[in-house]
Image: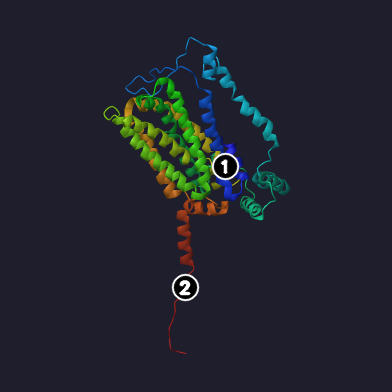
Amino acid sequence: MNVQPMYFGESAPKHLRGAVALSSAVFTAFGVVLGQVVGLRYGQRPTQFYQNSLKIQYVPQISKKNTLANLFREILGSEPCWQYLLASNAIPGLIQLLTLPWFPESPRYLLIDKGDKEACMNALRRLHGHGVQNSELDEILQEQAETRGMKPRQPWELFFDRSMRWQLISVIIISTAMQLCGNDSIYVYASYVFKEAGISADKIQYVTIGTGSCEFTACIMCNLLIERKGRRFLLMGGFILMTVWAVIFTIALSFEHKVTWMPYLSVTCIFTYILSFGMGPAGVTGVLPTEIFNQAARPAAYMIAGSMMWINFFIVGMIFPFLVSGLSEFCFVPFAAVCLLSALYVGLFLPETKGKSLSVITSEFHKLNFKGQDRESSSQTQAQYQLGEVCQSTAL
């Protein structure tokens, strides 16, 4: 999940860098939908998952009748077929194993890390299907000149490099917010909300496919808009909309037993929440490390970003049942706070990277990394170089 967007971002031209790198998120969302469809089973009955007032998930019970007709209707989600569902993950892995050796290396890796200009130009021709444009090669050569003499960074070295301070802070905050925004938790809550809306238990699994389809559709829309609207717009818009829908979702859960149409509002919030996530954080988060780090620090930055995602994913999975037990219908208030704070950070500190070269993006972060020193150096320069006094006199 880390190497794919990095490879796409390093191989794409500047004007398509975001859209190409974001394609990894599009196919990840497609894999979620495909897994939901293939994992369908026939005749599920819900049981209580959490022992409190909110029953937010169901556990399927196995039917005793395993007729041939049911097996066809269950696809691979039944007990006799679960091993085939698990083994189906080997199919895309085998396809990649057979096809990836034919892919060229990243042009930036070949030129900057290996110093092989000819191999870099051949890789650009194979990837783009036409002659190498001078502007694209010049951009890679400029990055090579800026990183000349630099060794590949280790992840822990980035924490002590002041020139990378705000880039690293941005990646950590955005990667953390992607998992702490509550999108994965909304999938868990979906079954309970659908049940309260009157959807029969055996039909909930089909409605749940709509949640994955929403994220897939939103990622496609994000892919089409990222080079037009920019990264900051999509990130801020996604987090702000998620904040709004989390608040409305909390209100709907609080009044679902008092107002008859509130469960339908809860269902709407689930789909709009997932749409907002797919339009912003789901796609743009994986693009940022490619654009704000140079070739020497980029792999280490992706390692840190990936670690933050999985650590926070584990944290959310562990604490969400306790949030439900302790906060009940207010369990999404912490997620709303995370989304709001993330939107504020993006709006205040993260510069726009759309269509910009690495040197321009680095210079914008340089103003943040050395803000105090720049003021001191400018004041010292003014104190050292002062204009002389003008003496006006009529004496010859």
User: Residue drawn at (47%, 73%), measured in percent from left and top?
Assistant: 387
Q: Nearer the viewer, residue 295 or 47?
A: 47
Relative to 251, 18 lies left or right: right
Label 2, secondary structure: give it: loop
Q: Which residue is mark 1?
A: 21
Q: Does the rendering let one see residue 331? A: no
Label drawn at residue 147: none
The amino acid marked with disc number 1 is Ala
The answer to which image quadrant residue 100 occupies is top right
Q: Residue furthest right?
A: 118
Foreground mark, 1 or 2?
A: 1
User: Residue drawn at (40%, 27%), measured in percent from left and top?
Assistant: 189
User: Residue drawn at (46%, 25%), measured in percent from left and top?
Assistant: 206
Q: Which residue is mark 2?
A: 387
Relative to 18, 240 lies left or right: left
Image location of residue 201, percent across then percent down: 41, 20
Image location of residue 170, percent across then percent down: 48, 44
Q: Nearer the viewer, residue 63 or 112?
A: 63
Relative to 244, 82 lies left or right: right
Image location of residue 99, percent across then percent down: 68, 33
Q: Does the rendering let one see residue 84? A: yes
Badge 2: few (under 14), some or many (20 or more) residues near its Cα, within 10 Å?
few
The answer to which image quadrant residue 295 occupies is top right
User: Residue drawn at (67%, 44%), measured in percent from left and top?
Assistant: 127
